[in-house]
Image (tube, rainbow, N blue to C red):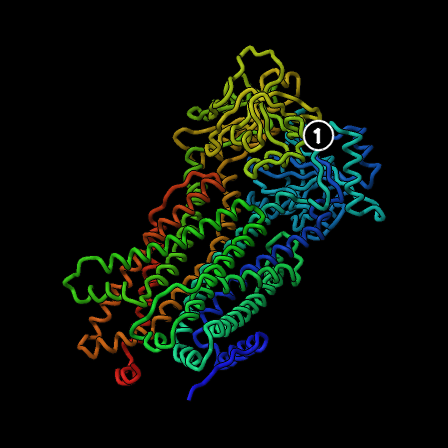
Amino acid sequence: MSFVVTPAPAVGGSLLAFRLALRELRGGFAGFRVFLACIALGVMAIAGVGSFAQGLADGLAREGRLILGGDVSFSLTHREASAAERAFLASRGRLSLAATFRAMGRTADGRATLVEIKAVDAAYPLYGGVALDPPGDLANALASHDGIYGAVADETLFARLDLAPGARLSVGNTQVEIRAVLRTEPDKLTGGIGFGPRLLMSEQALRETGLIQPGSLVRWHYRLKLATEDATDRAADNVVKAAQAALPDAGWAVRTRTNASPQLERNIERFTQFLTLVGMTALLVGGVGVANAVKSHLDRKRAIIATMKAVGATGGRVFAIYLTQMMALALFGSLIGLAIGAALPFLAAWSLAAILPIPIEPAVQVGALGLALVYGLVTALAFALLPLGRIHDVPVAALFRDEVAPERRWPRKRYILATAGAIALLALLAVVLAYDRRIATIFVGAAALVFIGLRLIAALVMLLARKGPRPRSTMLRLALANIHRPGALTPTVVLSLGLGLAVLVTVTLIEGNLRHQLAAALPARAPSFYFLDIQSQEADRFDAFVRQRAQTAELERVPMLRGRIVAAKGVKAEELKPDQSAAWVLQSDRGITFSSEVPAGSRVVEGEWWGHDDTGPPRVSLEKRIADGLGLQLGDEIVVNVLGRNVSARIANLRTLDWESLGINFVLVYSPGTFRGAPYTDLATLTYPHGSSTMEEVTLLKAVAAAFPAVTTVRVKDALDAVGGVVSKLVLAIRAASLITILAAILVLGGALAAGHRHRVYDAVVLKTLGATRGRLVSAYVLEYVLLGLATGIFGVAAGSIAAALIVTKVMTFTFVWLAGPALAAALAALALTLLFGLIGTFTALGQKPAPVLRNL
């Protein structure tokens, strides 16, 4: 008797495959917990990051006018708007003025600290409100009572100087009474990092201080509130165009509510990309877990697959059944991740509202969730196709004897091509949808190199174990045999452990370098003080005063103005397309100086420096990397607006700078005659070559503040502490985000070892039957895991170190220092984790009774 199996029609075949796939899943998800967890983790990260970022973008768009302080903002540095300019702005809507300035605040007993002054007029704030403690009216708090102007301040100022409401503080040549604590400042986000606490006062009070001098570093912000019927984005853009047409040389920086804080938006986009890449890394690491889970599942289903093939199922039909099953599981895991990811913005808005001064508009972001779903499904497909494709051509007999003679072969070309296509689609999505495609491309390339490298490491370890000399020790021989035997766990363990270790070392070294740069390296070389707004008529007296009180220190003083690049090579600044490394130069005004000599810390690398007696046309020296980023060369013209006047100059030479010294460095240095007759102030630094004590610095700070009330003193250690606080929060966020990837790696490692558990049980039972003791088997397994961990650890440390070095030097532009302690600690942690997971599975295998296992061999 013979049976003839007739293939089912295509539609019926697809339906049958779907029904059989779902029928097998009725038994539960045993064996797929790691599969589901890996997919869910990666999808959750991408969905949560995308939804949170979109919520931030929506919040910034909704609160744009609140963050900006108006519908349109016009900002000037050094000078106030002229009467004609103010009249033009006032004709377009309700006008409000806010001036920002750094100065020294001094108490009656001589204590002094840097304060960030904001002086406002009666119309402030145009949008939002100011919250005071005790509650009160802002206008009344800032008003003059009995000849003393009022002010409100951050709580930090009260703590720093041990003040209480009602205390008086000297600023410049006058005193103000601090009447309340400033709890809420609606336009605070536009101010950037502050090196001192906020002191909010009236415009009249600022003028009484005597700090406003020609060339003083005051920024004047003119905010417009458009009439209700004109308060549209188009109306705001029309006001900007009208201002540029009527007052083309005003030199002001203009923002509208749609780009209220460009730097904040850029930072959010960059951090979003970083977190998205973390999610992608988690998905890629999880992909290894997917491949392990698929392989383990098919291994458990050998008898069922053999039976289906024996009764006539084709290889394509079997492939379709299990592909449907894997994608259904991937969809289920992705939905779990989507649910958690969609909830993250709501959780963040609820938990961070009090400490994060950024408006979050949580919502279910369909686009971000859809993208995360695509990432999850494509990743599952990419890693499942190859192990699934191998079952197409495996004969029935091979399936039945696979337990003792596993057959290794490549799947058909169509499965290989499909896998390559899925990987290419994943890489394309990562690059095309990235904020910075260059970084995304580097990430994709690095991921590919790490995967290839780990596969090569696994192959090399197996080759050395197979070809190496046979040791005398029985346990070592058994360990080496386990490494290279058919069906060995070496490739999966090396891949999962290596990926997780590489990520861990990368994050650890980046964090260590950030802390090293800010907490150790910079202060040793940096000046102790910056002195700003030194008036030219007091410069000589200031030099003598400081040198008398700090005789061992080095004082350097140079003239300084502020200017904004408005054009280069005849192209307007807003139309230039700079590299990302140089874009910051165009985003706001920059410090500029003029000198007859090459500034200290600079080295001319192209062109010639002008002479001491230069009387030629205006010429400028530009920092080399900035010039390259802007596409500028020697002889090109650059136009900078200074004090409301456009100054054109030709690039005479290019310089390199030592930015990390924190000395006086300027991107733009002009020939001496360029600003002849222009008002300016001096900037000075004071450096103690052999270091200084806190007492010395505090004593000098008090003396300078008392003798020169108009001079602003910035203590570098305080500034570094302010920046360090921001970096510490960033490092904490990086560490927390990277935990997702590390957790995925741990899951994959555990899954890989669990996938080989059945083989371990058979090995242990057979060896125990032949006389091996439990102690010898444990020793052999420990040796196996130690050898695998050491080989993988060397690669993981090397790959992570290279990745960290590239990020620190190319992206963060710091000097990279390899920190042996943190890197080796990460490697030892990974090795310990491998041993722990391996031994847990080993003890379970050793506890199996021989009879039931031998009966089923």
Q: Quadrant of the C terminus?
A: bottom left
Q: Position of residue 792 (x, y in %)?
A: 33, 56
Which residue is drawn at the image coordinates 44% and 60% (left, top)?
285
Residue 86 to residue 654: above or below: below
Please state which of residues 11 and 808 is positioned toward the viewer in this rendering.
Answer: 11
Which residue is drawn at the image coordinates 64% and 44% (left, top)?
153
Determine the residue located farthest toward the bottom in the rendered image: 1
Q: Position of residue 236 (x, y in %)?
A: 78, 42
Residue 359 to residue 251: above or below: below
| Residue 621 appears anywhere in the view | yes
Classify mark 1: helix, strand or loop: loop
Indicate the amino acid at tag 1: Gly
Q: In the drawing, does residue 479 fall left or right of residue 283?
A: left
Please state which of residues 519 and 463 is positioned toward the viewer in this rendering.
Answer: 463
Q: Which residue in the protein does label 1 denote?
A: 251
Q: In the drawing, does residue 264 fall left or right of residue 599?
A: right
Please state which of residues 79 and 688 is positioned toward the viewer in this rendering.
Answer: 79
Which residue is drawn at the image coordinates 44% and 47% (left, top)?
510
Quarter of the view holding residue 492: bottom left
Q: Position of residue 529 (x, y in %)?
A: 50, 32
Quarter of the view holding residue 584: top right
Q: Residues within 10 Å of mark 1 (few under 14, many from 20)?
A: many
Residue 221 to residue 537: above or below: below
Please state which of residues 653 and 599 is positioned toward the viewer in this rendering.
Answer: 653
Q: Quadrant of the N terminus?
A: bottom left
* Numbered circles on residues, count: 1
| Residue 736 appears anywhere in the view | no
Quarter of the view holding residue 367: bottom right
Q: Position of residue 587 (x, y in %)?
A: 63, 37
